[in-house]
Every structure is written in C-alpha cells, then in structure tokens.
Image: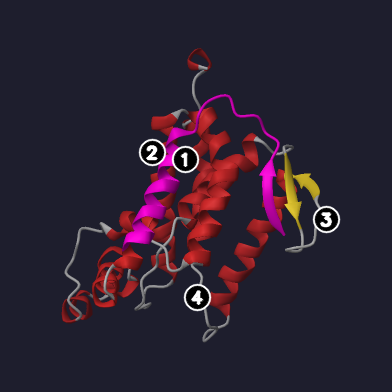
Amino acid sequence: MIPIRDTAPCHSRPVVTWSLIVVCTVIFIVMQWLPYEVSYRLIHLYGMVPLRYSNPDWALAQGLPFDGYLSFLTNLFLHGNWLHLITNMWFLWIFADNVEDRMGRVRFLIFYILCGLFATYLQWYFDRTLEIPVVGASGALAGVLGAYFFLYPMARVILLPIPFIPFIFNVPAIAFLGIWVIIQLHNATTSVVFKGVSVDVAWWAHLGGFIAGILLYRYFIKPQAEE
C-alpha cells in the first residue's frame, strides 16, 4: 500500500520538515557524485557501524576511531539508495507537517532528533556485531509516525494499494500506522529469535523510533497560548 496523502489540516508552513527533506536529498546527491572510495569511507565514518562501538579494537583496526557516538546522529541524514531516500522523504512529506504544526519548529526538530537517537541506540543494542553501517532517517521518521498515531488517529490516509492501478481508497491513520508498526515488530523480533536470518533493514530502529515518538510527543506539543 502506497500512501498518497493524508486529510489532516496543516495551519502553518512546515519549514523544518521541508528543510530535513532538502538536507537529506542534497547529501545523498552529493554522495552519488563523489568517487566510490570517498563515499564508501564517509558512509562508514558517519553511518552507525554497531561493531565500532561494541569492539573498539576492531574499529581502530578498520580505521574507525571513536567519535563520541557522533554517528548516532549523522546516520539519520544518510541513505543507501534512491528507493531508501524517496520512501523516507515521501513518508516525511505526508506525516511530518502535521506533527510540526502541533509542536512548532524548534520543538519538532528536537523531538525528531531525540527519536532518531533512541532509534539508533536500540538498533545498536539488538545488533551489536553488525559490521555494516546503519543509515537513514527511518528511525526519526518512525518517531514522527508514533506522534501522528496519537495526534491524528482518525485522519484519513489516502492509499494506492497496487502501483500503476488507479484504484484509490482511504483508511484511518490509526489502522494504517497500526499495521505498519505490527510489521516492524514482527520483522524485528524475527531477526532476534531466528538467528541467521538475513536482515537488510534496521527494524529495531523503526520500532525504537516509534516507541520514542509515543513516549515523547506529549512533552513537545505547543502550549495553547502559542497556538
């Protein structure tokens, strides 16, 4: 199911949301222009490589010195391929404007980063031996979805179920996002219970971000006097 748009009204310009989309897109395009060796190095330096923090000796041998956990933040602005980027930015475009509208720009940015940091931490906690970089805005985006889940549960999400077939329908956000989080939980737990299962998506980051969003969103809503 491909979400096209939502029906929740937005009463302010989502400047932070637009800025995040632009920053992530520009970084991705620049990375595509760089020589492969340079982009490969940057992805490993600024993407979150779990084993880098679990095994410092291994990290030093790979030329990955301790960075004060900086990559827990910087990985949120990197993406692995065009599909990864477009999917994240599309969900951000649909759902983040309303959350930013309810929080205000500064509060929303802090909320977004906190959700992303917790998402990255949870991914590291459950996958500490991974040697490849974890990248993407998915964890922070999941926090936005967690907030949207409670702020706009009955807003309608317009869906295109099958690509290139013009049959459109809509469902409550609580149903669409409920199914989404169940899928994340299933895939995350499967990767833990069944050892050896190939995992190329940071499911724990998705789940962690959603949890952070649920827990934190109420503390970032604008007071009535500011609305």
Q: Nearer the viewer, residue 46 or 4?
A: 4
Q: Give the range drawn in magenta.
A: 1-30
Mark drawn on residue 155: none
Q: Residues within 10 Å of mark 1 (few under 14, many from 20)?
A: many
Judged from this view, the residue extending furthest toward the top is: 225
Secondary structure, mark 2, is helix
Q: Which of 55 and 26 is in front in this view?
A: 26
Q: Earlier in the sequence, mark 2 or mark 4?
A: 2
Query: On screen, 158 above or below 138?
Result: above
Left or right of residue 159: residue 27: left
Residue in the image at 60% along x and 63% along y: 184
Residue holding disc 3: 167
Q: Are marks 1 and 4 in contact (CB under 8 Å)?
A: no
* Three-letter amino acid code at the position of disc 2: Ile
Q: Which of marks 1 and 4 is nearer the N terminus?
A: 1
Q: Are marks 4 and 3 in contact (CB under 8 Å)?
A: no
Left or right of residue 95: residue 65: left
| Viewer-nearest of discs 4 and 3 | 3
| Viewer-nearest of discs 3 and 1 | 3
Q: Can residue 128 be seen in this view?
A: yes
Q: Which of 101 and 67 is in front in this view?
A: 101
Q: Earlier in the sequence, mark 4 or mark 3?
A: 3
Which corner quadrant holds the N terminus?
bottom right
Q: Distance between the residues labelled 4 and 3?
A: 31 Å
Residue holding disc 1: 17
Judged from this view, the residue extending furthest toward the front is: 33
Residue holding disc 2: 110
Residue holding disc 4: 200
Residue 23's x, y, as percent?
37, 49
